[in-house]
Image (tube, rainbow, N blue to C red):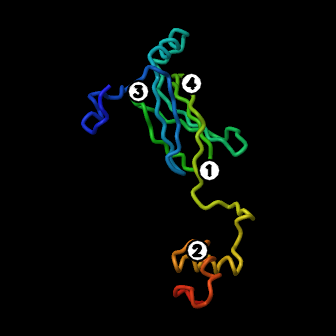
Amino acid sequence: MHPLTRENLNAGETLPPFYGQDTLVLMARDPYWLYAYWELTWDTINRRKEAGEPLDRGKKVLRIQKFDHEGQVMSYFDIFLDPESCSWYIYAGEPDRSYQAHLGYQLPDGTFTSLLTSNRSHTPRDGVSSVIDPLWGYLNFWQRRLFYRTLKFNMNSAELQRREKEPAGMKGGLGHE
């Protein structure tokens, strides 16, 4: 093992470009975009070819399924990929939705053959939550007064309450508002 110093941070090692495992991962980048990366091994492709599927005549496709809030498939769209690609940014176009990707081939007769399925990914909302928690309602008069005083004098509430209990001459310049 080498010592942990800045000079030995990399130590000549690099991450491998591929790990030899079939993988498809889908992630939300922001409310409108997704990111997918994958590794498709030759063993999987060869197994499917031996099963009689003419993958070499098909086009590599990333199929994105969009789900409603009950978990049912609403729609899907296909992205035709370069055969050598291993990642893709996807414009989903709708926030607060769940998506799932399938990597496969579209055969000459139009049928889609899925080779890998991703996890489900949920895009975040693009605005403030519409849920108003009754426990976090509006402040009453005394709470607002305490809040603004702590802001004004840069003190925490315990310090402000301690100073409020001091006699008038001992308030240390706080005075009354």
Q: Which residue is mark 1?
A: 96
Check if mark 3's residue and mark 2's residue have beta carbons within 8 Å: no
User: In terms of depth relative to the viewer, which is nearer, 133 or 154?
Assistant: 154
- Foreground tag (3 vs 2): 2
The residue sitting at the left extreme is 7
Which numbered mark, 1 or 3, is in the foreground of this view? Answer: 1
Q: Is residue 33 above or below residue 150?
A: above
Q: CA distance from mark 3 to mark 2?
A: 66 Å
The answer to whether mark 2 and mark 1 are in CB contact below 8 A is no
Percent across and percent down for residue 95 are 58, 51
* Callout 4 touching callout 1 (CB < 8 Å): no
Disc number placed over residue 1 in the picture, else none: none
Q: Label 4: state its secondary structure.
A: strand
Q: Residues within 10 Å of mark 4 (few under 14, many from 20)?
A: some
Q: Which residue is mark 4?
A: 114
Label 1: how many Cα within 10 Å (few below 14, some 14–19, many 20+): some
Choose the circle earlier in sequence order: 3 or 2: 3
Looking at the image, which residue is at 55% across and 10% down?
51
How far from the left and from the top, in percent, is residue 4? 31, 35
The residue indicated by pointer 3 is 83
Q: Amino acid type of disc 2?
A: Glu
Q: Which residue is mark 2?
A: 159
> Which three-letter amino acid code belongs to the residue tagged 4?
Ser
Circle nearer the N terminus (4, 1): 1
Measure the C-alpha gap from mark 4 to mark 1. 26 Å
Tell me the SS state at disc 1.
loop
Identify the amino acid type marked 3.
Answer: Pro
